[in-house]
Amino acid sequence: MKIQLIEIAHARSGDKGDTGNVGVIARRPEYYSLLVKYLTVEKVKEHFRGICNGNVELYELPNLGALNFLLHKSLGGGGTISLKNDAQGKTLSSVMLRMELEIEEKHLNSEH
């Protein structure tokens, strides 16, 4: 079944120079394993095609039920020199949450 990421997670984002930082947090503890399985570096890189011009790094934070993605070369040089409307990457989390994931229905309960 196809769902938007926002159905199983929420997110926060910001900047570290020219790197966008997006934290994705499972809405329920049982959804963390779905994030690990389906929200891959490759999937994120494809979703941010045209925005992220560098590598995507992933850090797993199982004790928080979260994943942290670094999107290198995404902010036009960074806050003080970028001409982008969102030089601090504050909207990257909204973009991330609109990603569609193909998840096996057996992994979701009927009340997700």
Image (cartoon, rainbow, N blue to C red):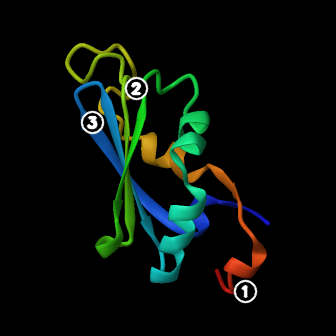
In terms of sequence position, does the residue under pointer 2 or pointer 3 come before the other? 3
How many C-alpha atoms fall within 10 Å of the one at disc 2: few (<14), some, or many (≥20)?
many
How many C-alpha atoms fall within 10 Å of the one at disc 1: few (<14), some, or many (≥20)?
few
Q: Which mark is residue 110?
A: 1
Q: Which mark is residue 15?
A: 3
Q: Nearer the viewer, residue 105 or 88?
A: 105
Note whether 64 is above or below 58 in the view shown.
Answer: below
Q: Quadrant of the N terminus?
A: bottom right
Q: Residue flagged by tag 2: what amino acid is it? A: Ser
> Residue 33, percent across and down?
52, 72
Label 1 element class:
loop
> Residue 9, percent across and down?
50, 66
Residue most extreme to the bottom: 110
Looking at the image, which residue is at 50% across and 63% down?
36
Q: Nearer the viewer, residue 89 or 41?
A: 41
Label 2 element class:
loop
Looking at the image, which residue is at 56% across and 22% down?
50
Q: Residue flagged by tag 1: what amino acid is it? A: Ser
Which residue is disc 2 drawn over? 74
Quarter occupied by residue 2: bottom right
In terms of sequence position, does the residue under pointer 1 or pointer 2 come before the other? 2
> Residue 47, percent across and down?
60, 38
Q: Label 1 near label 3: C-beta < 8 Å?
A: no
How many C-alpha atoms fall within 10 Å of the one at disc 3: few (<14), some, or many (≥20)?
many
Q: CA distance from mark 3 to mark 1?
A: 36 Å
Label 3 element class:
strand
